[in-house]
Every structure is written in C-alpha cells, then in structure tokens.
Amino acid sequence: MKMQHQPAARAAVMSDVARLAGVSHQTVSRVLNNHPSVRQETRERVLRAVHQLNYRPNALARGLAARRSKVIGVVSFDTILYGPAATLLGIERAARAAGYGINIVTLERLDRSGVAAAIDALSEQSVAGVVLIAPMVSAAVAMHGLPTGVPAVLVEPGGGSELPSVSVDQVAGARLAVEHLLALGHETVVHITGPRDWLEARDRLEGWRLALETAGRRVPPAITGDWSPRAGYEIGQSLAERRDATAIFCANDHQALGLLRALHQRGVRVPDDVSVVGFDDIPEAEYFTPPLTTVRQDFDEVGRRCVAALLDLLDGSAEGANLSPVEPTLVIRASSGGAG
C-alpha cells in the first residue's frame, strides 16, 4: 500500500501562543524575557501554551540588538493594485541601495490580528525592522496591535500614529487636479471617488472639495466608485448625458480609462466636450486615447524615505514621528482642455 505524505505542520509563532493563552502579544514577549511585571498565574498560562504548541523562540531575533539583520520586513495589502505595488517596488529599490534585502508578507485583511501575526512571523525570520503599507481606514485599528520593541515605519497611515510615517500629500494632489480644470474655464468639477474605506480616496475627496470651496464654486455630489476601469465605465454611461459635467476628476487612472471608453462610445469628445484628469500616472496613462492628464506620485521617494526612517530608528536617531509628506506633481496631457 502506497503511503501518502502529509504536509508538514506550520511551526507555531508568538501570536499562536498569545491566542491560546488568551493574552496579548506583548505579554507573551514579557514572559519569554522574564519580565517581572507579569502575574504568576498569567506567566504559567503562557508557559503552558508554549509547551502545548512546542513554540521555539528565534534566538537570533532576540539578539538583533547586538547584530543587525540585513533584511527588512514589509507587510502589504492587495499588491495587485498599482499604488501598493508601486510603493512596494520603491521600498525594494531603496532597501537594495542601502544594502538590505526585503521579506514580504501580504495580507488579505488589514486588521489587528493579521498585522500582529505578520510582524510576529517576520520577527521569527530575524528582520531588522518592518515597513507596514497601511492604505485603509482599518489600518488605524491595526496599528494599535503592533508588537512593542519592533522597529516599524508606516506608509499612508492617515495620521494619529506615534510611529514614523511616510505618505504622499493626497489632498494637495487632488487640489492640483481641480485647480488645473478650473483654470481651463470649467465652472465646476465632478469627482468619481475611490472606495470610502481607503485613506487615499478619502483624502482625494477632501482635496477636491477644498479646491472647489476655495474657488467659490459649486460642489456637486461626489459619485462613489472603486479603483477599477469598470467603475469608471459604468459611471461614465450616466455622466455622458449630463451637460453640466464638462470636467471630471477620477480618483485613479484605471477609473479614468473606463470613463474615457464610456464617453467615446456615447460620442462625447475628450477634451472638446469633457475634460478628464486621473491620479497616479500609471505607465500606460500616456498611451490612453487621448493621453491622460493625471497626478503623479513619486513612489521611489516614498520608498527612500521609508527605508531612511527605518534605518534612523535602528540607529536610535529618528527625529520625529511624522515626516514631511511627499509632494505630488501634475502631468498635463491631451485629456484636459478649455471649457467649450
């Protein structure tokens, strides 16, 4: 009879011990490091969980203070999307330039338990520190679950964190887009938003509103979308019928791609009848029909600042929790023109 090989069981990590013992990740760490502030009953419960799970702490990770690893851990979410993927690439380039490799954990859900488990797993692999790409509102909760003692830098945290953070000024980018369209003579600008649970979408919505209010223009109702070309296409079917929609600001370039197709199918000329501006400056944007005016994010600079901030933490020379935001730039192409 042929024997079937069973897959090897996953080695237990610190978050498994914490879950079984019913305590926090930090409490497990204190017990393993013989911290005196832990109650005896709690200590015994944690040690029983350690024994039951056959948990083996990574000795090298404990010794990182004396001997720094040359690997940076990155916790990311949905790297299929252009923004997170480009951010990850920027971090990788900056890490390589600094003589570091990266180890990536991709989460399906950005919540407290997922982030804690990811950082726990990276700690077990002896990373020097962690960069967390945190583009969603749920990241605000997840940050409170970060284990203490792990050097970490956040990308797009939305403010309110005590950890060093790096972000692109999304509000300023949206204002650049809207101010450009108003300068071309458009009375107002329609906005198709990104998903409301994304910090970038929230900030671009705010920048759009501020630009219109500052100019004393009517603020039309924002139209909720997502990051996909399908959203832009479906919303574009109705916008093609609106005579007041002479200028449209899309929350990202993929949305704008779908919008351009919908307008073309309805016989609406861009930019003669309607001007369109996107956000991100994806590599394909200059090859759209017409080439897309958009807001460029400097993801290489985001990566450079992330790695520099993390190395500052490791050297004990970080100068503040929140670094100055990376400024976006407007790239003007043929999809935006004067009001008819």
Image (cartoon, helix red, strand yellow):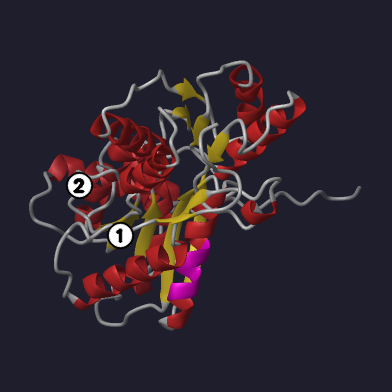
Q: Position of residue 14 (x, y in %)?
A: 36, 51
Q: At x 40% / y 67%, what residue is drawn?
A: 301
Residue nearer the viewer, 125 or 97: 97
From the top left corner, tell me how far across and down residue 58 is, in percent.
38, 67
Which amino acid type is marked by label 2? Arg
215 lies above or below 318: above
Tell me the residue that label 1 is attached to: 153
Residue 188 sits inside the magenta stretch: no
User: What residue span does the magenta drawing correspond to?
Assistant: 89-94
| Residue 43 tag number | 2
Identify the image quadrant of residue 41. top left
Give, as a three-letter code, the residue at label 1: Val
Neighbour class for label 1 at 10 Å: few (<14), some, many (≥20)? Answer: many
**x and y percent of residue 275 in the render?**
55, 37
- Overall secondary structure of the magenta stretch? helix
Q: Is residue 281 left or right of residue 72?
A: right
